[in-house]
Amino acid sequence: MSSAATLEKAPVRPATKRAGPAASRRDRWSRRAPLLPALIFAIIVTQVPFLVTLYLSTLSWNALRPGSREFTGLSNYATVLSDGRLRAALLNTVVLTASAVIVSVLLGLGLAILLDRKFPGRGIVRTLLITPFLVMPMAAALLWKHAIYNPAYGLINGVLGGDTDWVSSYPMVAVVATLVWQWTPFMMLIILAGLQSQSLETLEAARVDGATGWQTFLHVTLPYLRPYLELSALLGSIYLVQTFDAVFTITQGGPGTATTNLPYEIYLTTFRKFEYGEAAAAGVVVVIGTIVVATFALRVISGLFKMEVSR
């Protein structure tokens, strides 16, 4: 049979109707449907606990007094902001976070400048410097408590001599030093990325104009690194404001309340005082503070991306 005859006997299919709004809506939902379980899981895991925390923060609820649970509005927030112990914890949180971030950024800047130069074994040195950031926070705190600060066999007394109990004598410094040791590599990596993306033509132009190394760093490199310094400081603040492992392991918040920060105070309020409502209110205050810092961090990240695109 010829091809022409086959074409003549072939059934004529009706013209396909153009997909309407209902069909396109079905197509969109068919593409989104596989993502719905992940979306629902994310909402359940992240938002439901926060909503429950908000509800608990409005209750006067002490587990040691059964039947005393009652709605008290925002009174727990007033307690959190007016209680002397919680205000001290808030002040300790600010001091601990600011000290650790500032020292980490300065040390990270110095190490990044050194690693930006070429020298034999630079890859090995960079790997060794990054290693502290890879250690688990609890393991790092135990390492410093027993191997560095111990008055009998610790490294510091072994080098300097004496039997100083560093944790009891300088508790805040002991915690901050541990955090600086662990977080300096994080700051160093961000700043090093900024240094290595700097235009060599700009540095060469400054050198041709007669600028010294210090003048080039002060007037060219440092302004260029400003977004990277801000980003490392903000990201470090977001993580370090939640420090619990180092305080719990090294000082237990003491002596007295010398190193009790908000996360550790929330732990004490929940599991020692069993004041669930106050602990939930303090947790909400920490979340709000973290969101404020995170908002600035996101703006800095957005600025960095715009700067990279505009090049």
Image: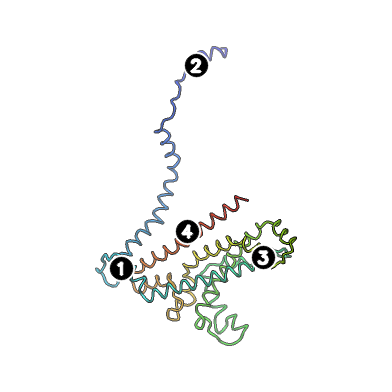
Instruction: Name the residue tied to disc 1.
Output: 75
Rendering coords of residue 48 (x, y %): 37, 56
Rendering coords of residue 107 (x, y %): 61, 70
Instruction: Name the residue tied to disc 4.
Output: 295
Say which amino acid is labelled 1. Ser
Say which amino acid is labelled 2. Ala
Residue 10 marker: 2
- Of the pair 86 and 206, the residue shown nearer to us: 206
Q: Earlier in the sequence, mark 4 or mark 3?
A: 3
Q: Distance of mark 3 from mark 2, alpha carbons?
A: 80 Å
How many numbered callouts?
4
Instruction: Name the residue tied to disc 3.
Output: 217
Residue 250 marker: none
Q: Is 282 displayed left or right of 117 in the figure?
A: left
Q: Residue at x 41, y 76 (%)?
A: 88
Kindly check if marks 4 and 3 are in contact, taking CB atoms under 8 A apart as contact. no
Say which amino acid is labelled 3. Phe
- Of the pair 246 and 216, the residue shown nearer to us: 216
Kindly check if marks 3 and 2 are in contact, taking CB atoms under 8 A apart as contact. no
Kindly check if marks 1 and 3 are in contact, taking CB atoms under 8 A apart as contact. no
Numbered disc 2: secondary structure: loop
